[in-house]
Image (cartoon, rainbow, N blue to C red):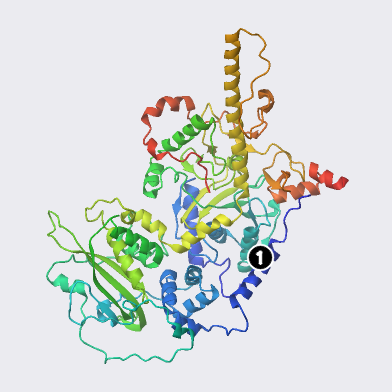
Amino acid sequence: MKGYNFAYLDEQTKRMIRRALLKAVAIPGHQVPFGSREMPLPYGWGTGGIQVTAAVLGASDVLKVIDQGADDTTNAVSIRRFFARTAGVRTTTVTTEATVIQTRHRIPETQLRENQIIVYQVPQPEPLYRLEPSRIETRRMHALSDYGLMHVKLYEDIARYGQISISYDYPVLVNQRYLMSPSPIPAFDNPKMHMMPALQLFGAGREKRIYAIPPWTEVRSLDFEDHPFRAINAPHPCGLCGATDSYLDEVITDDRGGRMFVCSDTDHCSERQVAGHVGADGWREAAQ
Amino acid sequence: MAYVAVKGGERAINNAHAWLAETRRGDASVPDMTLPQIENQLARAVDRVMGEGSLYDRELAALAIKQAQGDLIEAAFLLRAYRTTLPRFAHSQPIDTARMQVERRISAIFKDLPGGQVLGPTYDYTHRLLDFELAEAPEEVMAAMAAPDHAAMPRVPDILGEEGLIETNRDADREPGDLTREPLTFPADRDVRLQALARGDEGFLLALGYSTQRGYGGSHPFAGEIRMGAVSIEIEPAELGFAIDIGDLVVTECQMVNQFKGSKTVPPQFTRGYGLVFGFSERKAMSMALVDRAMRAAELGEDTTAPAQNIEFVLYHSDNIEATGFVEHLKLPHYVDFQSELQNIRRMREEVARTAEQAAVTDSVKVADQSAETTTDTVPSPSLPGLTRQPALQRQGAGCRVEPGNDGEGGVGHSFGRLVSDLANVPDPAKITDPTGGGE
């Protein structure tokens, strides 16, 4: 794009971000402060993810951007277009074709490969912030691995509700050391982070933090030996492709209680439909 | 109704932007507003946008205001995003407000002083009556002007300083920090705090400053001096070895003089709160000075109990570009997380229903025992609105699909049972108040 450097950020800024990324990869799950820049998109819209993507993107990369698992949600469209304009890289909606995937709130259903990078947009990198709002305090707690407060919160949930009430942004312990926010992905996606072959990078622009999980790293969702972690999902197959192992969106179809469940990962769903899988709603429509 | 996944987000965005452009221009029969008009006639808006946008450029600020339809936070955001892309040629010398070309200078703590009280173009003593003549094209107004006074106009704290009555500011022995390059870390030094306040939201600082006056961290302030006018900017290129003047900028400076009782090592003296902002923005400069002084509470050995004294709280929440982005991001789609909450709440309601049903069964068994009857096949229905009763066995796992969690037996070395017995050692249970948890 005329007047701007490749992928918008100047090379000095990219170098600063890459340094933070290297440190983050070296200390899995540890939040590294970085000199987050003001981006031409608002804070909260993925400025951290965009800066990380800009810093790792090369001319030959193929970029996929998803929001809520979908390639065609407005913010995903906007960010994809931003990089298409400022970096001129090839973009795709196909998970397997992408070398860099920027995401908000989901991990694709298709297992990622070793030569892929997934970049998460993070609104709140501090996993302890609801229990202790002061970052001076939480920094100390991370330094000392003092995570008792979080275990007590989980305990209180079980005592009060019989189960842990966190359904997304479910805290994980990375490499047996740092408590980490997985970003607001549904707890359903947490197990995908464990021993993932791809490099996982996290950018929080407003909070000015970067963190990372190197490939093949242990990522455990916090739980108790006698109350193991359980991810939840809607108890239905996908209405369009019949998948029973994907995370589902609930779509309201009328004002009389009508609803259907469809894959949140739009690429996964359409790939399955192309391969001939049809869900109950697909059959019904075909019959009509 | 069949569901079709929404496509065409890109077209929707393009159409929305076209509509926005049309709305911005408004009625085409009304003349388009020019940047010089905004620069001159909406000068206070330009000042605010330059301050919060952290870029001194009246013309660009006017453009941002026009582009943002007068939404000043949006305009400041436009300016900030542009500012980030600018190369840095040089760092200026510190500006010297003692050498300001003063347009306004008042002190609330002396009746008269060298250089005098200069009211300048102030609203202070206007009666707030809507001036209907302004609605028509008003006549050209020429204010009477005295010849510029070149007499020295020392800053009031400097006058107090001669007698040693006010603390001296240590000369910085290092380059000041820069929030726009390095992330905020704590403890945050005063240079960085002042930078954050100068970029901070006027409304936020006004409210915080006001709160200190109402008892939330009061510091007995007096407006020692407020001055507004042009100062020159100088840089010292390495190859020259001396400073050269590269231009002027208008700033408003406020120095609050505050009470301080002294300590064993320091004799009683006044302390100061400092405010400096781009343009003519007295409200913000004064608020900034109040908040600056409040944030020095810990340094001066005062109790830190009020929000304005909590450095971390103030600095993390003063930036309106960050704040508006994060507040407004809630309108982005969150349906994946909401779906997980839906399933979660359904699962929890089932748990409640099951518990209630078990209680009901137990009760009915008791009743049956007492009346010595043997037929208890019909279980009394617990009257829980909105909950459907199902036989317990069928219900297991009905409302949610339980996915495999951590592989193996799970657990990160913690046992729920053990934790229960450890609970006597809970650090601070009062802090655990949020029953729902979760993230964004």
Task: State whether residue B381 appears in this view.
Answer: yes
Q: Which subunit holds the residue at mark 1?
A: B
Residue A36 shows in the view: no
Return the x and y of residue B332 as percentages of the image width and height.
Answer: 59, 56
Mark 1, residues whose alpha carbon is within 10 Å: few (<14), some, or many (≥20)? some
Label total for image: 1
The residue positioned 47% from the left and 45% from the top of the image is A127
> Which x, y percent locates residue B393?
67, 23
Q: Is residue B292 left or right of residue A267?
A: left
In percent of width and height, residue B425 lies at 36, 30
Say which residue appears at 32% left-offset and 58% top-offset: B211
Q: Amino acid at mark 1?
A: Ile
Is the residue B397 above or below the residue B310 in the image? above
Tag 1 residue: B13
Q: Quadrant of residue B183?
A: bottom left
- As drawn, the residue found furthest toward the top would be B372
Which image quadrant for residue B409? top right
- In the picture provided, is B317 more to the left or to the right than A261? left
Q: Residue at horizontal 59%, vertical 33%?
A: B349
Q: SS at mark 1? A: helix
Quadrant housing residue A138: top left
Front position in the image: A15 or A166 = A166
Q: Is residue B199 above or below residue B96?
A: above
Q: Residue at x 55, y 64 (%)?
A: A41
